[in-house]
Amino acid sequence: MTTSWNETQQIETHLLGTNHPSDTLLFEAHLLLDEELAEKVIMQQKAYEAIQRYGRKQLKSEIEAIHQTLFTQPKNTRFSQKVMRLFRKP
């Protein structure tokens, strides 16, 4: 099951929804007729989902590191106090 670069691009445009409507219809017809292509689409979708999860995890880690820097280091005490005052209930 090898995938050509052209096929990978076709799958990508399909998954991202950037195809022209007539191309979408044609590609979906190919999916119905070609089980291997349908399998490749599923595999590429799973790869995109894994990449997205990884990116979210990385972003959360970066945000947490910034939070720790801003709210736990003594040199940032005044800043953290100002922020906390913004969210204090009246």
Image (cartoon, rainbow, N blue to C red):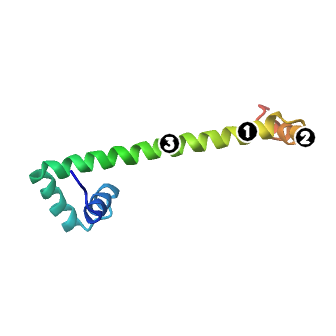
Local secondary structure at mark 1: helix
Indicate which disc, 1 or 2, sits on the residue closer to the N terminus: 1
Horizontal and vertical percent for residue 12?
32, 58
Give the vertical position of 72 relative to 24 (above or below). Answer: above
Asked if marks 3 and 1 touch (Cβ < 8 Å), the reply is no
* Disc 3 secondary structure class: helix
Q: Residue furthest left?
A: 33
Q: Quadrant of residue 71?
A: top right
Given the image, on which type of amino acid does mark 3 rest?
A: Tyr
Q: Closer to the N terminus: mark 3 or mark 1?
A: 3
Q: Which residue is mark 2?
A: 75
The residue identified by callout 1 is: 67
Question: Is 79 displayed left or right of 15 in the figure?
Answer: right
Q: Neighbour class for label 1 at 10 Å: few (<14), some, many (≥20)?
A: few
Question: Mark 2: which amino acid?
Answer: Lys
Residue 80: name its quadrant: top right
Q: Which residue occupies the extreme front position in the image? A: 2
Residue 49 placement (x, y as % from top left): 40, 44
Residue at image mark 3: 54
Please say if the residues under marks 3 and 2 sit with CB atoms less than 8 Å apart.
Answer: no
Question: Residue 45, image x and y in percent?
Answer: 33, 47
Q: Amino acid at mark 1?
A: His
Residue 43 percent across, percent down from the top left: 29, 45
Residue at 77% of width from left, 31% of height from top? 89
Q: CA distance from mark 1 to mark 2?
A: 14 Å
Front residue of 6 and 75: 6
Rendered position, 75 above or below 6: above
Q: Which mark is residue 56?
A: none
Q: Are marks 1 and 2 in contact (CB under 8 Å)?
A: no
